[in-house]
Amino acid sequence: MMTHFKKILIPLALAALLGALIFSLSQTAQSPDVTFTTIRGEKIPMAALKGKVVLVNFWATDCPGCIKEMPDLINTYNEYKQKGFEVIAVAMPYDPPAQVLNYTQQKSLPFPVMHDGLSEMVHAFGGVNLTPTTFLYDKQGNRVQRIIGELNFAELRQLLDKELH
């Protein structure tokens, strides 16, 4: 009796798991319902950014890849911001706040910068622990890409041209 039950239960469990996996893969990840508090004290709810293509970049002042990609990120932001592109730079919790502020001022970062001192964003975006990590959302708040490592700016510009047409 027990082996007959197992013969039925195991395929049913596998079918249920497979169905759940297919369902989760078919669902478009939505942007988390968060509010960024910038180092200038400005509050930016993610919901208020609907209608824009939003790039959320997790970075650190001691991350060589982050520092290397920052000039291209500034140029891309300046090129596309009038077309509905927004960048939010989220400095990692371990980054000293004074260093983040100093870097932001030295490099005249033109987009909002937040220091994630309490790890709220790290957790809200699924446990970010590598830098740079970038999330790109379309105008409806659907996640288009999650990129770990340096951005490919040629690909990003192609995507922005398509999304912001």
Image (spheres, grey):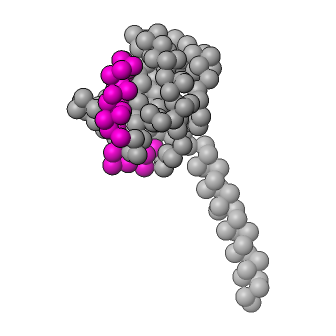
Q: Is residue 4 magenta?
A: no
Residue 159 seen in render: no
Residue at image point 69% right, 62% down: 15
Q: Is residue 141 left or right of residue 41?
A: right
* Residue 126 drawn above or below residue 12: above
Q: Nearer the viewer, residue 62 or 146?
A: 62
Q: Quadrant of residue 110?
A: top left
Residue 21 position in % (x across, y down): 63, 53
Q: Residue furthest left?
A: 41
Q: Is residue 18 left or right of residue 70?
A: right
Count the labels in the image.
Answer: 0
* Residue 150 drawn above or below residue 159: below
Residue 123 seen in render: yes
Residue at image point 35% right, 41% down: 96
* Residue 143 drawn above or below residue 120: above
* Quadrant showing the N terminus: bottom right
Residue 162 position in % (x across, y down): 57, 16
Q: Nearer the viewer, residue 106 or 80?
A: 106
Residue at image point 54% right, 31% down: 64
Residue 99 position in % (x across, y down): 35, 34
Q: Is residue 24 left or right of residue 13?
A: left
Q: Is residue 15 left or right of residue 75?
A: right
Q: Which residues are magenta?
A: 96-125
Residue at image point 55% right, 13% down: 161
